[in-house]
Image: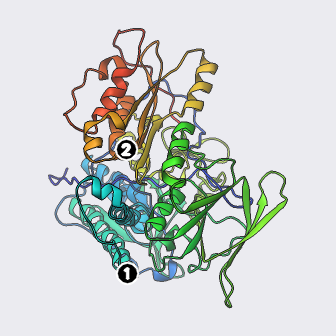
Amino acid sequence: MQSSISLSLSSASPISVRSDGGANSAAPDLFFSNSSTPNQLRFCGLRREAFSGCKSSNNAVLFKQLRPKTKISASLSSNGNSAKGFDYDLVIIGAGVGGHGAALHAVEKGLKTAIIEGDVVGGTCVNRGCVPSKALLAVSGRMRELQNEHHMKSFGLQVEAAGYDRQGVADHAQNLATKIRNNLTNSMKSLGVDILTGFGSVVGPQKVKYGTVGGSETVITAKNIIIATGSVPFVPKGVEVDGKTVITSDHALKLETVPEWIVIVGSGYIGLEFSDVYTALGSEVTFVEALDQLMPGFDPEIGKLAQRVLINPRKIDYHTGVFATKITPAKDGKPVQIELIDAKTKEPKETLEVDAALIATGRAPFTNGLGLENVNVETQRGFIPVDERMRVIDSKGELVPHLYCIGDANGKMMLAHAASAQGISVVEQVSGKDHVLNHLSIPAACFTHPEISMVGLTEPQAREKAEKEGFEISIAKTSFKANTKALAENEGEGIAKLIYRPDNGEILGVHIFGMHAADLIHEASNAIALGTRIQDIKYAVHAHPTLSEVIDELFKSAKVKSDVSSAVAEPVPV
């Protein structure tokens, strides 16, 4: 029986890092491929359920804090009838955003569903990631505006010196996380999902156990199982994290201090967002980046503009092409010490002495202790190998029947809304409908001020693809300086960039840097998902004056040789 209750809550913030500032680091890439090519692909659209834009869950991070094994069953909706011979149609290990999206879709499909969580509902995103970080970034955005006297005067406004209460800012972030966590829990309970508390692991084909470490355990059976255990901060060798002066993003989100000088190791999404927060609150920031340029995961042109706006004018300096081989916390009156070496020659460079260090070198999959050996599965760099349909692959290269893995744990695309979309795609499959997700249609965003967003290929990636497959690409650009709404807000800094095929109008990639870029990217991502050509989408009508006209002008400025409308070839999933 399907529920008549529908939810429409929203939040979107991917935190996923491609850069690495630590020695001997193996921070995960955004994409990880081990798939074969299917004959026909169908696309999975993103849900509008609660918070599909966040990180997937860590199944259990703090074992000591686990409550006694409990089962919460909802009474407002039927949870279906399980397949004959099984306790459940679907059991999901991990109640982050990926597991949550899969669970809600499964109930809609009439599947009897249970979700196992060893820490707290919401996983990394809600509790230690994109949700509390957006609260901190909301504060930093307002602080920047209030501190910009010239900006205020341009509106005819006079504002006294802006200040902040650190504890009040921290409370705002934690209160938001609590509210969203409760919303996710209530949404599952109301729709009839059984929430099982404890650490979950696979004990055999179609069989899972859950319970507390060293305590009692319960074994349940399921026709299908989804692993959605997410990731944890990646800490390179030689880095000693004390949670006070040498911290990860988990600690930084608590905002227990605002150091005068903080080093951020890694200049990807996480590092950039925290540099925005810390500099707005008065800190000086130094980036340590292993690669030769900052923001290596972004389109190079967008990265250069972002550096000019987000880094150069602010109290930020940087060291590129260096590893942090050893980081020692502050103690006995001594500051944090960071030893740097040249990334190529391994020659010692210098030692920094600072107030604090934030390790933002990416995230590592949380896949230990899942009982994968019981189904002959071996991880690859910690990731669980899957095919394009998220089906788990064993050590012999064969599919493990009825076992799936979604989100950060499979490493295909370490974004929470990607995890949710993968989970929904899996539910479609176990419900009898073949379904493959097009990862090239999934957008990403960095919530700095201004924001950065992207979908599809960067220009170097597109040129490599074009050379390999024998077609041409073209580039179109528009500026926020020509947009009425942006000028009304005195926020004309920014561009939008379109990478496309002039022969058939296929959209290969879109990159935006500017006000509300994270919201504007979805028109492009949906166009890629639906196979819409430029010659069709350029006739779409946008309200005036709105920021959406930046994208309208972008598509209209593209020059396509053929006006013939037809769906583009469906891309091979990543």
Q: How many marks?
A: 2
Residues at marks 1 and 2, CA–CA distance in whole angstroms:
30 Å
**Label 1 crowd (10 A; few <14 / some 14-19 / many >=20):** few
The amino acid type, in three-letter code, at marker 2 is Ala
- Using residue 290 as the reference point, say whether residue 199 is left or right of it: left
Can you give x and y, in whole percent of width and height, for residue 96 in the image?
A: 40, 61
Instruction: Report the residue marked by disc 1.
Output: 167
Q: Is residue 13 left or right of residue 290?
A: left
* In the foreground, 156 or 285: 156
Residue 304 appears in view: yes
Q: Secondary structure at mark 2?
A: helix
Q: Which circle marks residue 517 in the picture?
A: 2
Q: Using the image as rendered, state which of residue 462 and residue 126 is in the foreground.
A: 462
- Image location of residue 471, percent across then percent down: 56, 15
Point 28% across, 39% down: residue: 547
Q: Quadrant of residue 162?
A: bottom left
> Residue 436: x percent and y percent?
43, 35
Q: Position of residue 105 (x, y in %)?
A: 30, 49
Helix, strand or loop at disc 1?
Answer: helix
**422 and 77: which one is in front?**
422
| Figure quadrant of residue 479 | top left
Depicted 104 relative to depicted 486: above or below: below
Please report contact status of discs 1 and 2: CB closer than 8 Å, yes or no. Answer: no
Instruction: Tell me: residue 390, above or below residue 416.
Output: above
Q: Residue at x 45, y 40 (%)?
A: 454
Query: Looking at the picture, does residue 376 appear above or below residue 391?
Result: below
Kind of residue at badge 1: Gln
